[in-house]
Image (tube, rainbow, N blue to C red):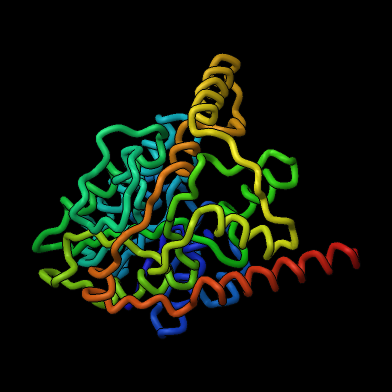
Amino acid sequence: MKILVTGGGGFLGKAICKQLVARHHEVRAFNRGDYPELKALGVEQHLGDLRNLDLVAAAAEGCDAIVHTAAKAGAWGSLTEYYEINVRGTDNVLAACEIHRIPRLVYTSSPSVVHSGQDLNGVNESVPYATHFLAPYPQTKARAEQRVIAANSAQLATVALRPHLIWGPGDPHLLPRILDRAGKGRLRHIGDTPKKIDTVYVDNAAEAHVLALEKLEIGSAIAGKAYFITQGEPVNQDAMINALLKAAGLPAETRRISVDFARFAGTWMERVWRLLRLKSEPPLTRFIVEQLSTAHWFNIAAARRDLGYAPRVSTNEGLARVGEQLARQRMQRRKG
C-alpha cells in the first residue's frame, strides 16, 4: 500500500515509518520539518501544518491509507492551539480521506481520554470517556478520537489506538522530563503508596499501528473501535521511574510528597503562570499530579485478540536498550 504517516518525523511516527518500509509498503510522511532519517529510509516527505487543509490533502493524494500520529502533546498550553492542531487537524485528515476516497485511517489516540482523576485498574475499552479534563491535551485528543470513530462508514474504515506512556531510545518526552527534574533536584514521588501504571515501548506501539493498518478494511472487525496498547505488564510507577533513572546512570529517587501538597503546588503554579502569561510549562500542574498519583493500567485482551498484538520487546529489554543508548551519549560527551 501507499501510506501517509502524519508526524512521520516524530518519535512514534518514525518507528512506524521504519516498520512500514520493512514490510515493503510505499511510505510518505507529512511533517513540519525535513528529517534525514526518513530520507535515508526512502520515505517521501511533505512539509506542512495540520491546520492547512490544502497541504494535508496534497500530501494524501494517491494514498491507500493514512496513519495519523501528528498531534500537539504536553501538559500545559493554550486550549485554542491544542484544539486547532489536535481536533481541527484531525478534521483535515478526515477531509483528505473523503476528498481522495482513501478507505483506511489509523488514528493515534491516548488512554488519557478516559482518565477522570480516579484510579484505572485493569479497565478495558468499555470504560467511558472522561467528563472533565485538567489539561487541553487529553481533552482535545478525546474530541478528535470521537470524530475518528464517528467517521467510520461504508466509505472509510477507521480505528483508534491508545498507546500509553511511550518510551524507548530517542524518547523526546517522558525520559527527558524525568532526567531534567532529577538533575535539578525537583523529582519526587507523589502519594504514600506507589500506584500501578502501564507503559509501552516505542517499537511495540509502532507494531500495533502496523498490525491495525494491515487488518483494517471497511466493515472489518476492528473498524470503528478503539484499543489500548501497552506492554501488557503493569509496574509500580516508582519502580518504572527509578528503572529509567538507573538506565541513565542516576541514583533511585526515594523522596515523597503528599498528594494534597502536590495538588496545592500544581494549582498555585498554574495560577502564577497564567497571571504572568509565562510561555514555559510550570514545574508542576494538576494534570501531572493526577497522572503521578493515580493508577492507570489497562486490559489489552482486545488488542491481542483483534489485532494479533503481542509486545515483542519486554520492559527489561527495552530498559537495557535505553541504558545502552544513554551510555553511548555519555561516552560521546566525554570525548567531545
Residue 249, image x and y in percent? 75, 62
Q: Quadrant of the C terminus?
A: bottom right
Q: Residue at x 59, y 30 (%)?
A: 282
Closest to the observer, 314 or 32: 314
Q: Is residue 18 visible?
A: yes
Q: Quadrant of the N terminus?
A: bottom left
Residue 160, image x and y in percent? 28, 59
Residue placed furthest toward the front: 192
In this picture, residue 33 sits left or right of residue 226: right
Is the residue 137 above or below the residue 12 in the image? above
Residue placed furthest toward the top: 275
Q: Residue at x 61, y 67 (%)?
A: 169
Q: Residue at x 64, y 52 (%)?
A: 176
Marker count (numbered)? 0
Q: Residue at x 49, y 67 (%)?
A: 202
Residue 170, image x and y in percent? 62, 63
Closest to the observer, 150 or 139: 139
Q: Is residue 88 visible?
A: no
Residue 64, image x and y in percent? 28, 71
In this picture, residue 335 sits left or right of residue 270: right
The quarter holding residue 60 reads bottom left
Is the residue 2 above or below the residue 165 in the image? below
The quarter holding residue 276 reads top right
